[in-house]
Amino acid sequence: MKLLELSFIPARLVIQAMPLNPGSHLVLHAGAPQGRNIEWLYWSIFWVLVAVFVLMIAAFTRAGARSHVSAWKPLPIIENDEADRRAAWAVWSAVGVTVITLFVILVISVVTGKRVEGLTSKNPVTVQITGHQWWWEVTYPNSQADQTITTANEIHIPINTRVVVLTNSADVIHSFWAPSITGKRDLLPGYSSAFWFEVDKAGIYHGQCAEFCGLQHAHMGFSVIAEPVDKFDAWKRQQLKPASDPSDAEASRGRDVFLTHACLMCHTIRGTDAGSRFGPDLTHVASRNMIAAETLPNTAGALGGWIVDPQRIKPGTKMTPNALAPDDLQALIVYLRSLE
Amino acid sequence: MAVAEPIIPNDQDTGQSELAHRLARTWRQSGGFWGWFSNTHHTDIGIRFMVTAFIFFLLAGILAAMMRLQLIRPENSLMGPDLYNQIFTMHGSTMIFLFAVPMMFQGFGVYVVPLMCGARNIAFPRLNAFSYYLYVGGALVLWGGLLTNTGPDVGWFAYVPLSGPAYSPGHRADIWSQMITFTEVSALGVAICLATTILRHRAPGMTLNRMPILLWEKLVISMMVIFAMPAVMIASGLLLLDRLVGTHFFNPAEGGDVLLYQHLFWFFGHPEVYIIFLPGAAIISTLVECFSRRRIFGYTPIVVSVVATGFVGFSVWVHHMFATGLPQLSESFFTAASLMIVIPTGVQFFCWVATIWNGRLQLRLPMLWAFGFFFVFLIGGLSGVMLASVPLDLQVHDTYFVVAHFHYVLIGGALFPMFAGIYFWFPKMTGRIADETLGKWHFWLFFIGFNITFFTLHFLGLRGMPRRVYTYSPDMHWHRLNLLASSGVIFMTAGLLVFLANMLRSRKSGEIAGNNPWGDAGLEWSVSSPPPAYNFLHIPTVSGRDPLWEDPPDQPIVVGLRDDIRETLVTHSLDADPQYKEEDPGPSIWPFLAALTVSATFVGSIFTPWAVPIGAPPVIVTLLGWLWPRGHSPAPRLAGEL
Amino acid sequence: MSTFDPPVPRPMTLDVSGLPSVAFGHRNTTWLANVFYMAIEGMMFAMMFATYFYLRTRSTNWPPGHLPPALRYGIANAVVFLVSVIPARWVAKRAPSGDRGAIRKGLLILALFALIATAIRVFEFTTLNCRWTDDAYSSTIWVLIGMHSGHLITELIETLVLFVMSFTSKMEGTRLADAAINSDYWYFVVVTGLMIDVLIYGTTRFL
């Protein structure tokens, strides 16, 4: 076992020649117990397969080399029953080894599968993830409506705590995949399936939609932010608050712009009249690291460009362009960036 | 029939004897423009399948090159998502439906099988011709769509609900669905022709136990086509109905189910990849035997393996759906089945090693490609073992790791054997041998380019890059690997250009082949290159698995078939005992006309359901024209028969 | 023997001039093609049956929000199908004899049965108590009956064509075998029709 794990190091060095920035998203650099189980399975099977490959190539090479005759015209046919009898032993042994190897792979695969899928808990953090074209609706459900958190594209979880994800889709099939945490799960309309994961290393884990879902499938990312319990609780408390009131005239003007333009047709800002669920919830949009499903950094410039012409950045996205006067746009940006 | 002339064996037929002249006249196809559309001889139709399929291979390859150019750097603006989505959908759909099956199963099958059986023509020659025209119709519909900006853009498997009426307005997905109908009916037609030829038109003496492995494989594949294609016909048919007439098969809001589509599609989809790979394995078995200068090692285990693959291939489809959240127990079953199917392929590999090991290897050009197959397909098969494991699959499913895997098995398992088979049977088809040096350049350029491009993709998948993305962020650090992968395209393109040059040049000025340039054992090598219109001067008989190597010099040949009408011999399925004589229908324009009316109905039904009742009468008329008997007065044949 | 050995004359022959030019029953190649065709269409039906049962598992009520299809035309069709086996079998038995008169009568009766079955079908569509656009259940039973109707109409046309042919001198040799194979296809239509009847009228009431 130790030897096997030691082999991970040179293999990893070979495969990962580059730094990881901003978010960890590699299958072979797991930050979670399930991901590490899968990594173990990968390397175990990998070395077996390398051995098979080397043996088979050696067999073909030796066979070819020892029987090769340099002749252009077709040679007479030969027969060698004695050699064929010996070959029969070799072939059936090879078949036997193949069967045993496949069986071993089956067993370790099923065992790993049980370990990876076997997480449950009486007290998990529950996250409801609904796929949309092309963003992730993230809800932390609670029996009380005013204790329910709704956000988008960024999922916070406490480390060392079991998390159960309830899946759904509002339109087509999407797939939720954070490679450094665990395997993927499809989000199917008409189905709600539950899958569990747990992260033990704090950090930002990047993920991306992994089932072709239309024009902007390429720009449908998310991040899972694993943090200590106290930071997670603080984040939750902040998210539960309604939107902060504008602190100055410009922000107030910005809110007016929001409520008198197309924005409120699609977006919710709790504490205002904007309550549409068609697009992402913006109540705490300024608290997120990125916007437009991990496509743009959450900066004033990017936000402005996105608001004015989202089609230029994500052609085909459901958000329409907004021709705003420069002062209005500036005010809107100030307002939105105040929504921590 | 009283014969006063000497009986000439098939491999001595120079086309000069009286019998040869009479047969040539009886069996000739019509000339001229309409004659081309009336042709029902299998060699001509087989070559048409192969040439047409290769054209679409090149077109789909151009699409792939465009994809690699777009992905060569992050946030590239060579094309936007709409065009990219059409291109990858068209690439996959063209490669699978317009190239792989038409080339590997239909092209090679239609050309080689009747000759290898010792028959004058394929069974149901008009159905064979009809299948070709319907395939072309489907290809034109699909590519017509792309060229009018209505190319399908939902992936080659067109999952619902994305491909359904709510999320794919317009006719793009309808064009995809109907292309499926065209090509599946075409494949089913050829499957019926080939299965009947193999079961009922084998030369007397060619018992099942003496059938070449290629005939066994084509029989198994024909049965797979018959049992698998209906599933995709239903899947695409129900999708069309949802889109065009308002049914709710895949609409969860009204009791429909999105996974139903996936089950129906993959129940076809997995056998489909074996329908593409097994012809490759058949070619390899033929070549390994010929170029090791000995009979194949393990004939019975190989035949059993091929049949087993055919069966087990139907029990693994759920491994395409592991990420949908199905119960763990059922997923484990499909892991077990998916691992089990490695065994019959392993048996074939071991038998091939044993054949070469105890043979005398002559590494001529087709055999070089066979070695390429061994290397490439092996890697693809091994990465497939990883994908069979659920936890691993849940990580690499829908990533570039899978793209790498299936290109290794499809290019390794079909394309390399295809080139091997083309170089092998090119002499039989054209009478000349392809240039060996150009062929080697082709091989090495393509082999190197292929591995540069596709081996790299394994790493991209493990680094988190999903499939079907038109671009990616520089922060993902995928750009260097993508650049490396794109660079392999140059070598593959160069190799293909060399191939085309070789084909064109060798047809005109290649070395003259003679009947049997490779010294192979099959019956097709006992006739001239190219074969005459009647294939064999006399239907042969056989007494061994490798007729041209084993049969005694006085092996009987069949006499007693009329040479003034197109008489063929029908034999028993198991022991190939002569049963009765059947008349080949000869050239006919009706298959082409029927394909036109059927195509018009299929295309019309994309736009309105009324196309079906309106299109049906012309279809019936053309089918009547096809089936209405004509020609010979019954009297001479009835007397003394019933 | 390969081409690099000197040629040797081959006087041995297998003479097939005495073989017949037509075969009946399973030796006929068209019979085999028909078997393959029935396998293909049978798989199509099998996929639709699987679809029906699969969709049933996704629904709590069945039929969901509809009355089950009315029984009368389903029963009428089942009776017609069962009785029609008789003329079909009769044609198949008489065909090898070449008796054109008998074949003509048999085909006419068979065609009449197919016509009646088609007419019943038309009425059947109107008493299914649902429309194909209602929901997945309705879509499935309409498509099942629709697919089968396609086979019914094809078989009707084929029988009529053979009937017309039986007035001409073309009804000889292989065409006689075709007339018999037509009956095989009719059995397929009957069996699939009965299975669909059980599915649609039985499982909506008793499962």
Image: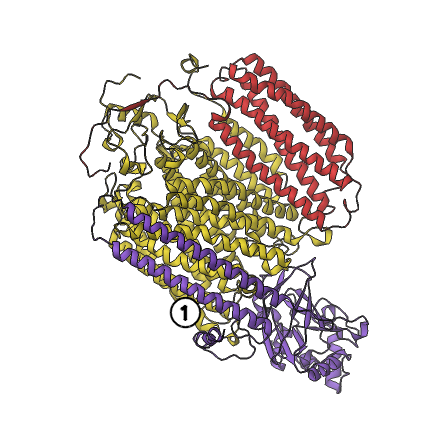
Chain colours: A purple, B yellow, C red
- Camera-nearest residue between A14 and C148: A14
Which residue is at the far left?
Answer: C6
Residue drawn where x is 60% and y is 57% of the image: B331
Give the labeled residue for mark 1: B484
In the image, residue A12 above or below residue B158? below
Please report, as a chain letter, where disc 1 is located: B
Instruction: Give the x, y percent position of residue B163.
Output: 61, 54
Q: Secondary structure at mark 1?
A: helix
In the image, residue A277 above or below residue C1? below
Identify the amino acid type marked 1.
Answer: Leu
Q: Is residue A153 left or right of residue C65?
A: left
Q: Is residue B57 visible?
A: no
Residue drawn where x is 50% and y is 67% of the image: A42
- Camera-nearest residue between B204 and B2: B204
Q: Is residue B407 left or right of residue A266?
A: left
Instruction: Give the x, y percent position of residue A154.
Output: 65, 75
In the image, residue C186 above or below residue B507? above
Q: Is residue A61 left or right of residue B413?
A: left
- Quadrant the N terminus of chain B occupies: top left
Q: Quadrant of residue A238?
A: bottom right
Q: Is residue B630 left or right of residue B553?
A: right
In the image, residue A31 above or below residue B48? below
